Amino acid sequence: MQVDKQQLREELGQRWKRLWPVTSGPPRPPVFEGVGRAAERLRRLDVYRRAQVVAVMADAVLMQVRINVLSDGKQLLGITPGLKQGMVLVDPGRVAVHRRRRALAGAMLHKTGRLVRLPDQRPPKIDLMVVGALAVDSRGICLGDGRGIADLAWAILGSLGAMEESTPVAVVVADEQVVELLPSEAWDLPVTHILTPTRVLTPPSPARPIPSLSALPPRLARLPVVQATRMAVTS
């Protein structure tokens, strides 16, 4: 299954590069034409309007989402690239409007926000999580870039009690990225809302994986945020 998923990532990555040449490097959630319209559809959802704290992955395609979160007076929990710098909180008034595009770039998040210093500090309750993907199907199953960072963020936040099984998770994708059926595994995090430039899809509520930091690949288990989370959970 893993080999099939990786082959699919490579095929989709090449397809998206042909559609949106700005995408480069290894297969990553692409920055597609119309991403601003998809981000605007997210703002119209009740789950977004009610949210006070929104966790957003560091993908470039989610830049407008991160900007909107602050513009709408919400608190942003930024998931730093690869979770290498952990998680940071960014308050709405912390970043001037004209600086937000630069300050909220993935590589700058750890300098912009306040680091959640586990195990002594805990993240606040998350009302909504937003992720990117290479593709998503009608069941809400996403195909990520293979690093497992969104799944790990879910496991960390769930283990800390900051996210619940019912916490909504949205994905921002192009219409072309919505496919019929994707391979899935037990630890894959399904989404509750799919936002594209032209529509909003709400898959049936699937079972969520139980948050767990056991049996992680060594490259993830060694991350300081994982070790600190384990300390916080057991303390």
Image: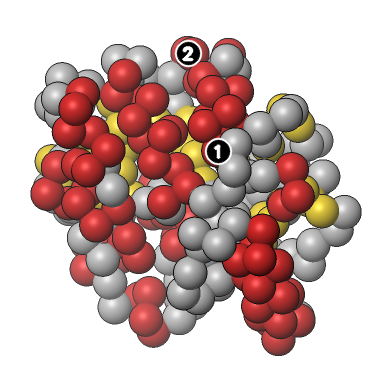
Residue 125 in the figure: left or right of residue 61: left
Q: Is residue 53 visible?
A: no
The residues tagged by marks 1 and 2 sit, at their Cα atoms, a distance apart of: 22 Å
Q: Quadrant of the N terminus?
A: bottom right
Looking at the picture, how far across and down is residue 66, in whole percent? Answer: 36, 35
Res 38 → quadrant: top right
Residue 78 in the figure: left or right of residue 59: left
Please tell me which residue is depicted at 57% across the width and 15% down the height of the picture: 44
The residue pinned by badge 1 equals 35
How many residues crowd mark 2 within 10 Å: few (<14), some (14–19), many (20+)?
few
Looking at the picture, how far across and down is residue 3, in whole percent? Answer: 71, 86
Total number of numbered labels?
A: 2
How many residues crowd mark 1 within 10 Å: few (<14), some (14–19), many (20+)?
many
44, 208: nearer the viewer: 44
Q: Is residue 93 visible?
A: yes
Looking at the picture, how far across and down is residue 199, in whole percent? Answer: 74, 28
> Residue 64 bears which disc, if any?
none
**Depicted 163 relative to depicted 45: above or below:** below
Looking at the picture, how far across and down is residue 182, in whole percent? Answer: 79, 62
Name the image colouring.
secondary structure
189, 147: nearer the viewer: 147
226, 230: nearer the viewer: 226
Please tell me which residue is depicted at 45% across the width and 81% down the height of the picture: 217
Q: Quadrant of the C terminus?
A: bottom left
**Which amino acid, mark 1?**
Val
- Is tag 1's residue or tag 2's residue first in the polypeptide sequence? 1
Please tell me which residue is depicted at 49% across the width and 59% down the height of the picture: 22
Q: Hey, which residue is sitting farthest right in the picture?
A: 180
Please tell me which residue is depicted at 51% across the width and 62% down the height of the picture: 23
The residue pinned by badge 2 equals 50
